[in-house]
Image (cartoon, grey):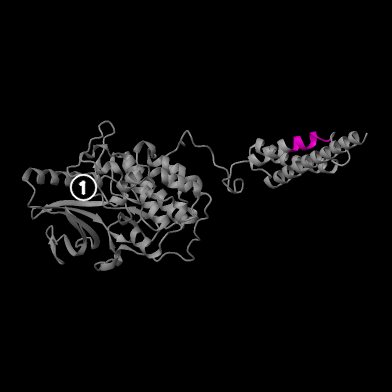
Amino acid sequence: MLREGTILQQNRYRITHLLGRGGMGAVYAAWHMSLEIPVAIKELTSQTDLDPQMLGQLREQFKREAMTLARLNHNNLVRVLDSFEEGGNAYLVMEMVEGESLADRIEREGALAVSVVLRWAHQLLDALAYCHGQNVLHRDIKPTNIIIRPDDQAVLVDFGLVKLWDPRDPRTMTVVRGMGTPEYAPPEQYEAESGSTDVRSDIYGLGATLYHALVGQAPPTATKRIVNPAALIPLRALNPAIDPAIEAALMRALELRPIDRFQSAREMAAVLSAPAQHYAPQRPPTGPPPPQPRSQRATPPARAQAMPITKPPTQPRVPPMRQPAPQPVQRQMPQPMPQQSPQPMPSQMPHYWPPQPRARREMGIASIVAFILGLIGLVTTFIIPICNLPFPLTGIVLSVLGIRSKQQRGLAWAGLALCLLTLGLMLLLALIGALQSIGDLVSF
């Protein structure tokens, strides 16, 4: 473990403090002494229980990770600046700017606003689509590995389980199996052979992360869900404000079988684009952001604010209202998915209720007619007791249809009661008439 003040690469980097540790190394906040900027340095430490051959493979993998990440250039991905070996350990240097992790935001605020989470989701899906296009998988997407910058951009960091993925030969090129964090790892990452992971594994990790952000609690692990499929609680049961379409999209991303999930980041982004139109964007800030020129970074960063994320954009800050979430993804998918159809404007589609079928509307009319027939039959019972028999019989049939269709059920029940009462009165009158006839015959 490096101590505070340690100098690396011949007075190039000075360690300021430890950011975090893992099984294979640690991440430090450091100061680039020649450029006078803060950086994050990831260290791969030597382990005594590993044989020299395995240790050599780990170092080769670490170099390959550095070369892979160095060629990535995306506003929502952490940028790699340098890599080197010193003192028997390998190091990876990344840029660091101000920000906080999504995990800290959730811990402080609980369940986050749907519009905000959707905006971050599109930014992260755009970054994943870019990574997957470069045949790079992350495999450890979780709230602690997502940094929210002051300009409200979500940045994906820590490619510690990075995998070079070849669609023609999906066997892993990673030496050490990366299971990831259980709550956010798909079941295929639990296997001893991790060759079954592909782009859909990142879809599961992002879906679990968005689930956590929207409801304020992490989803159950994949192993718990395999034992008890009902362990995953639907989002709307925890947060009724979530749109049903968003719930359906995230539940699909969290399917245990990869074939049941979205098959690409662009497909998931296209599905999330339609519900995003129904949420008003946040009100833009009233004043311009404070300038932060590089010349002002003459002193090491504060201990509490050092987080490894990408370089801030050089263009002027654009308020969220002028830069809606779906745009970044749409730039990388000029042709829409075949199954997608143009979405209506919110004013044309205020609800997601399906239109009422014509047959069910007719059943509602049948309930009204049954009620009217019951009234007619009851009124005419004492006038033409036998001739009005079709009224209650027809009314009974129509009222039964109305009750079964659940359309105008109250009128259907009332009509049924009137028709049955009419039949009862008719039977009573017929019985009285029969008794009178028998009495007349006996007296005669």
Residue name at image x 90 percent, y 33 percent: 441
| Front position in the image: 139 or 30 | 139
Which stretch appears magenta? 388-395
**Quick check: 165 left or right of 102?**
left
Name the foreground residue: 12 vs 159.
Answer: 159
Foreground: 385 or 220? 385
Residue 14 relative to residue 107: left or right: left
Q: Magenta region's main secondary structure? A: helix
Find residue 186 and report its horizontal and vertical position in percent: 31, 44
User: Does residue 7 show up magenta in the picture?
Assistant: no
Mark 1 Cα shell of 10 Å, populated few (<14), some (14-19), many (≥20) = many
Tell me where residue 344 sits by quadrant: top right
Residue 159 is left or right of residue 414, and the answer is left
Q: Nearer the viewer, residue 348 or 186?
A: 186
Tell me, yes or no, if residue 161 can be seen here: yes
Q: Is residue 326 visible?
A: no
Residue 113 screen position, x and y as percent = 46, 58
Q: Residue at x 49, y 59 (%)?
A: 282
Q: Is 25 left, or right, of 294 in this rendering?
A: left
Q: Where, by quadrant of the figure, is residue 429 drawn?
A: top right
SS at mark 1 in the image: helix
| Residue 11 in picture, x, y percent from top left | 13, 61
Q: Position of residue 235 (x, y in %)?
A: 44, 52
Dividing the picture into quadrants, the one containing residue 385 is top right
Q: What is the quadrant of the C terminus in the image?
A: top right
Point out the image quarter for the N terminus: bottom left
Q: Which residue lies at the image location 79% right of the left edge and 33% below the top edge?
A: 390
The residue at the far top in this view is 168
Question: Which residue matches tag 1?
Answer: 66
Which amino acid lies under the numbered mark 1 shown in the image of this protein?
Ala
